Image (cartoon, grey):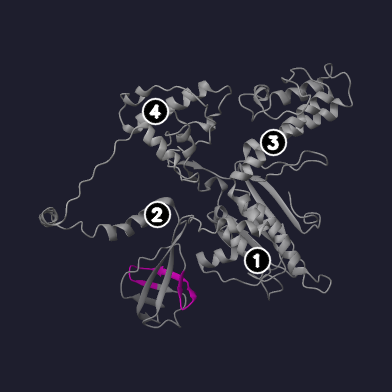
Amino acid sequence: MHGPAGIFESSRALISATLVHDVWITGGLVYGEPDSHLYPQREQNTQLLLHSVASPVCGLSCGPRFVAGDWNCETNSLPAFDLLHSYGFRDIQDIAWARWGTSVVPTCKHKTRKDFCFLSPEFQALLLNCEVVQDVWPDHAVLQGTFRSLAQVIPRQIWCNPNPMQWPPHWEVDPTVWSQSCATVDDRYEGVWQHIESSAVKALPFQVPKSQLGRGATRATKAVVSGKIAPIKKGRNGDFAPQFLCASFRHAQWVRQVRRLQTYVHFASQNQHLRDSTHSLALWGSVVRAKGFLPSFCNWWLESKFRVHGSPAAIPILPPTAALAGLICDSVALAVRAFEAQLKKSSRAYARLRRESNPNMVFQDIKTHADKGVELLLNPIVARVADVDHSSSALVFDHPPNFAPDAPLCCKGRPVHVIHAEEDSLWVEDCTDVLPGDQVVQLSMIGTDQQLFQSFLASWKEKWDRHAEVPASRWHTIVEFARDKLPKIEMKWPAIDPQSLHETVRQKKANTSPGLDGVKLGDLRALPNEA
């Protein structure tokens, strides 16, 4: 992993990935500097350790993740806690308190809380239980969580859009495609863009990957489970080191290809009879058959713009010399660096890290950012106690509260442990401090897509369906009054021709938001008049 010099050599920070149930779990561990005169800058150094670990784990990785360890600092005492919270990470004890009313306990010498285990939102959805074990180590407790199977990870709903495409300067399309006899206008629109893209591909001198095609074809979201992409292995001393750390399957394949070429160059420099060597044939065969290059590595090389001086025009089929393989390796390395620059440019996480390291870039972002949207709704359910039966430890409410059976209850800031529940009554373990008129509160968490949709739908119906019960005769009177009394305005829309549409598109700003059909402003500007 990349980071400041000495961070990962200090033996106080570690980032690792573990494959469990076909899902990669990324975790970061930090051991903060203790409060001692031997560590005069312990807070600054601990903050540097936490920031160097939390930034790549939270912002540059995906799937189930955690950041844990003995940080030797109190909760929320360093800016790194705000960084973790901004990415949706929460400590396992805080999650247990919010869900089940489990009290947060000290973890260091039974006095302070200095041991933490922050979980990502994907991991939080799988948490079943939290335990704090005090009898394993003499000074620190063990934070232990029980999780559901990783096969039950809730997939993210992704709306797939094509990547930007390099359109040809001139190409021809058939303007009669729009009049095709399809069932719906969606089919006609998809067919038009399919014809435009296929016509443009034929006019290009190189092959266009499938990821750049498919405008107007997406009509529903696609369920994607994070954590399926394997991280790049740490190379040996002298191996090609990546400068991009986000989860990208294509990037990992290209980095592995550079390392294959490095291994072959090292072997070829020490062996003269390459074409008679079984190992050289197998090693070079893995280079030629490498995946991740469309349609193949040999064909990709013919169209690649990244060539060092003296590199061959085509990839040799038989094992080449060490010098020739070195030129190919340097060329592919240039392509990987260019690909990393492209990925960084399009990565919001890297943009965020750049602004943290260079505050001057913040002045470029003075406008407010768009809200990420609602991921979780907390709906408080409040019931007022009408009567308390101390003999049977029963609480009677003034109305049926409809409490959820799997969520904790609180009264006066303390958890209420329920033994039995009826429609308007609860039998609890202890009701000595509960008086008539007190409120029992339960936070109902709404987190699935369908639950959020139904909640928003019910909220909007309260506003927009207020006139749903107005009879049609009443609307007839209102419309007649508008026709008789309100002034009339003649509205004429000018006809849209290719030239006026092209001029309108040309006046749009470069950062104009595209639609859900995947058609961007650059696509419209590149179209010929017939399209």
Residue at disc 1, secondary structure:
helix
Range of residues picked out in magenta: 409-426
Among numbered discs 3 and 4, the one appearing first in the sequence: 4
Q: How far apart are the two marked residues, 1 and 2, measured between alpha carbons? A: 34 Å
Kindly identify the amino acid type of the residue bearing the numbered disc 4: Val
210 vs 488, left or right, is right
Q: Are marks 4 and 2 in contact (CB under 8 Å)?
A: no
Q: How far apart are the two marked residues, 3 and 2, measured between alpha carbons? A: 43 Å
Q: Find residue 451 and report its horizontal and vertical position in percent.
A: 40, 54
Among numbered discs 3 and 2, the one appearing first in the sequence: 3
Kindly identify the amino acid type of the residue bearing the numbered disc 1: Pro
Residue on which disc 4 sits: 192
Among numbered discs 4 and 2, the one appearing first in the sequence: 4
Kindly identify the amino acid type of the residue bearing the numbered disc 2: Gln
Among numbered discs 1 and 4, the one appearing first in the sequence: 1
Q: How far apart are the two marked residues, 1 and 4, measured between alpha carbons? A: 52 Å
Q: Nearer the viewer, mark 3 or mark 1?
A: 3
Residue on which disc 1 sits: 79
Q: Which residue is rendered at x = 13% and y = 56% of the image?
A: 471
Q: Are marks 3 and 4 in contact (CB under 8 Å)?
A: no
197 vs 188, left or right, is right
Residue on which disc 2 sits: 451
Q: Are marks 3 and 1 in contact (CB under 8 Å)?
A: no
Question: Within 10 Å of the Cα at label 4, are there few (<14), some (14-19), or many (20+) other Cα atoms?
Answer: many
Kindly identify the amino acid type of the residue bearing the numbered disc 3: Val
Q: How far apart are the two marked residues, 3 and 4, measured between alpha carbons? A: 35 Å
Q: Which residue is rendered at x = 56% and y = 58% of the image?
A: 88
